[in-house]
Image (cartoon, rainbow, N blue to C red):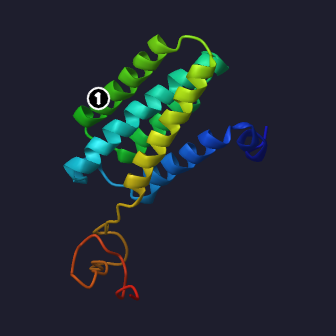
Amino acid sequence: MTTAVVWRYIAPMHRRLATLVLIAAFAAPAVAQEREPAERQTLIDLAYALGESHALRQACAGDGDQYWRDRMMQVTETEASDAAFNGRMTQAFNSGFATRQTEFPTCTPASKRAELMVARKGQSLATQLSTVTRVVRGVGPEGEEGAKSETGGPDSVAETPAPR
């Protein structure tokens, strides 16, 4: 099955969340230790939401469906975090999964509504992570430090200030 065919079968709410999760995972790749505490907490919250999504999707699609678990694996690989933080993300994913699996063991209209609510929460968290911009030092030509914003902050990559 081609990617386009698979993508067509993913419900629109799942496509949105999947897109945002991938953007969050790859838009600002950084070692988790370099992330601010608030960003690390957002990653933990996202892992919990992915666990919830995994359980809710499996309730309707069956135990063989690993869509959201695979996305969680991509996030942990991209973050390349230390073992302790990776364990926290895994624990959050498993907690979200267990909570929703207990609450919705079978596919029902209520589980579908819960899936939509979790997708919205995950979308919000992924959007928060995707807005993080940082300069990665030591990447590019020798001695290239990256550009700074008009305020001189290290999180801007703009060469010139944005028009106002």
Q: Position of residue 78 (x, y in %)?
A: 41, 46
Q: Position of residue 20 (x, y in %)?
A: 51, 50
Q: Which residue matches tag 1? A: 87
* 84 or 92: nearer the viewer: 92
The residue shown at (46%, 26%) is 52
At label 1, counting other C-alpha atoms closer than 10 Å, the crowd grade (few under 14, some 14-19, many 20 or more) is few
| Residue 128 in sight | yes
Assign a secondary structure to mark 1. helix
The residue shown at (22%, 53%) is 36
* 144 or 125: nearer the viewer: 125
Q: Position of residue 59 (x, y in %)?
A: 59, 17
Where residue 80 sits, quadrant-wise, is top left
The residue shown at (46%, 41%) is 122
Q: Amino acid at mark 1?
A: Gly
Q: Is residue 151 above or below residue 8?
A: below
Q: Position of residue 90 (x, y in %)?
A: 35, 28
Point out the image quarter for the N terminus: top right
Q: Is residue 163 above or below residue 12?
A: below
Q: Is residue 38 above or below residue 159?
A: above
* 32 horizontally vs 115: left or right: left
The residue shown at (74%, 39%) is 6
| Residue 70 in sight | no
